Image (cartoon, rainbow, N blue to C red):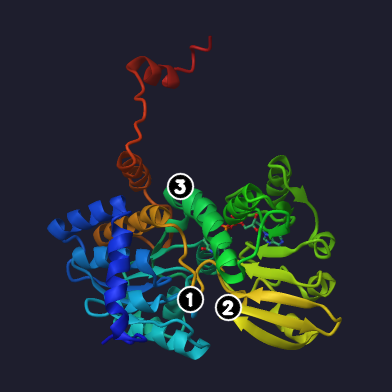
Amino acid sequence: MSKVKDMDLAEEGKKLLDWAVSNMPVLASIRERFKKEKPLSGIRVGVALHLEKKTGILLETLVAGGAEVSAASCNPLTTDDRIAAALADDINVFAWAGQNEDEYYDCLELVINSKPQITIDDGCDLIHLLHTKFSDQLNEVIGGCEETTTGIVRLNAMKNDGELKFPVMAVNNAHSKYLFDNRYGTGQSVIEGILNATNMLIAGKTAVVVGYGWCGRGIANRLKGLGAKVIVVESANENPGASSGYHRALEASYDGCWVMSLDEASPIGDIFITATGNKHVISGAHLGKMKDGAILANSGHFNHEIDLDSLDALSDSKETILTNVEKYYLKNGKHIVLLAEGRLVNLAQPTGQGHPIEIMDGSFAIQALCVEHLAKNGSNMAAGVYDVPIDIDNNVARIALESQGIMLDKLTVEQKQYRQNWKEGT
Ligand SMILES: NC(=O)c1ccc[n+]([C@@H]2O[C@H](COP(=O)([O-])OP(=O)(O)OC[C@H]3O[C@@H](n4cnc5c(N)ncnc54)[C@H](O)[C@@H]3O)[C@@H](O)[C@H]2O)c1
């Protein structure tokens, strides 16, 4: 039995779902195959994802494959109530926008009460809850899928501590996901979120992007395109399995951004955007140095990136200007504007639409195929964090290209042989 804000919003939600699927050719083709083959027949899938229209198409695809789906949001602010209502008949949906912390966790628990055999997480909250409060259910779980960088970091930490008890597919790490979703998706949608909230001009502003990973690169490059002067802040970070903070800082410099410490950037920036997946990267000391009217936005998974307790402590009062736009009046006489309570600015409702539809077509195609992979193979996989099989990853990119009418050249026999021949150098 679903728990959503208002079932009268369902009609509007269904129109949005129709619009989304008409721009999701890869997932639509998987949905058609799932309808015929029913690869998920009778499998209970528990989901914690931002509940918006593209997610709706993923959930419908799982249902088409025969799954019984229960879903909550992975963030208290990011449910589109129209979509939650539109899905609530066929799926157990426990989500509404503007939840408090208790309501958020209650909804995750309702998903867990459906006894999921496969989980889909964005940030690892569902898997974390299963391993802590509901560990008696762990033996029923075949496996899980994780959507984002922060979730993969948490899963690897669980694995290293010997605490991860089932196999999890690192969907985020598929090329068809992070190359497009984290970079172009976040790049476009974070700017859209900031513009929707503030209606301000980007051109001429000094924008500070903290973190030059896949998301930060996308955001910085889109800001440059809109005429901002972009400063990048990086850290002396090893980033296991990826290029280090040193490389990323150098890359940002070669990409034409100013690179400096946040101490140096704090008094200069007009807009600050965090994209690190780390905690308190903007600290009280930085906040105290900022210009009057500086704008703060976060695009990292959790609302930990900006030290909100310090922002409160530095302020005399705060005023809500619009939904998701709060003005903090600092004791030093300046004011700072915080967007979306420091949560993901591109997804926070009422205006956050998240990533562009075509981008989520690729990401959620990977999710659907990984759920199918777990349904087939999960029982024989040991606990751990798994890369998405390369054939799944390549197929999703191939179908996306075909749907855009983009052709690739084929290697000739001579070229294939040449690439395998280490003797022929000249
Ligand atoms: N908003 C969205 O829709 C969306 C989409 C995808 C990912 N994410 C989230 O965004 C965050 C970043 O993801 P990513 O894929 O770009 O990760 P990433 O690991 O590729 O990049 C993070 C970067 O931040 C840097 N960093 C870490 N601590 C720092 C600090 N204190 N100061 C400066 N730089 C620091 C790291 O060196 C790294 O280069 C994660 O939390 C991820 O889950 C959000």
- Spot the residue most to the right: 332
Q: How crowded is mark 1: few (under 14 residues within 10 Å), some or many (20 or more)?
A: some
Mark sitting earlier along the chain (3/2): 3
Q: Distance between the residues labelled 2 and 1?
A: 8 Å
Between 39 and 286, which is closer to the camera in this rendering? Answer: 286
Q: Is residue 216 placed above or below 254 in the rendered structure?
A: below
Mark sitting earlier along the chain (1/3): 3
Of the two numbered discs 1 and 3 in the rendering, the one whose residue sits closer to the viewer? 1
Do residues under tags 2 and 1 come within 8 Å of each other at their CB atoms?
Answer: yes
- Residue at numbered disc 2: 324
Of the two numbered discs 3 and 2 in the rendering, the one whose residue sits closer to the viewer? 2
Does the image show residue 299? no
Q: What element carries label 2?
A: loop
Q: Which amino acid does label 3 sit on?
A: His
Count how many numbered circles sit on residues in the image. 3
Q: What element carries label 1?
A: loop
Which image quarter is the N terminus in? Answer: bottom left
Between 21 and 121, which is closer to the camera in this rendering? Answer: 21
> In terms of image quadrants, where is residue 169?
bottom left
Q: In this image, 9 relative to 349: left or right?
A: left
> In terms of image quadrants, where is residue 40?
bottom left
- Residue at numbered disc 1: 350
Q: In this image, 327 relative to 97: left or right?
A: right
- Residue at numbered disc 3: 175
Q: Is residue 98 placed above or below 140 in the rendered structure?
A: below
Expressed as whole percent of the image width and height from the top left, the position of residue 101 reads: 52, 87
Q: What residue type is labelled 1?
A: Pro
Q: Is mark 3 on a helix, strand or loop?
A: helix
> In terms of image quadrants, where is residue 251?
top right
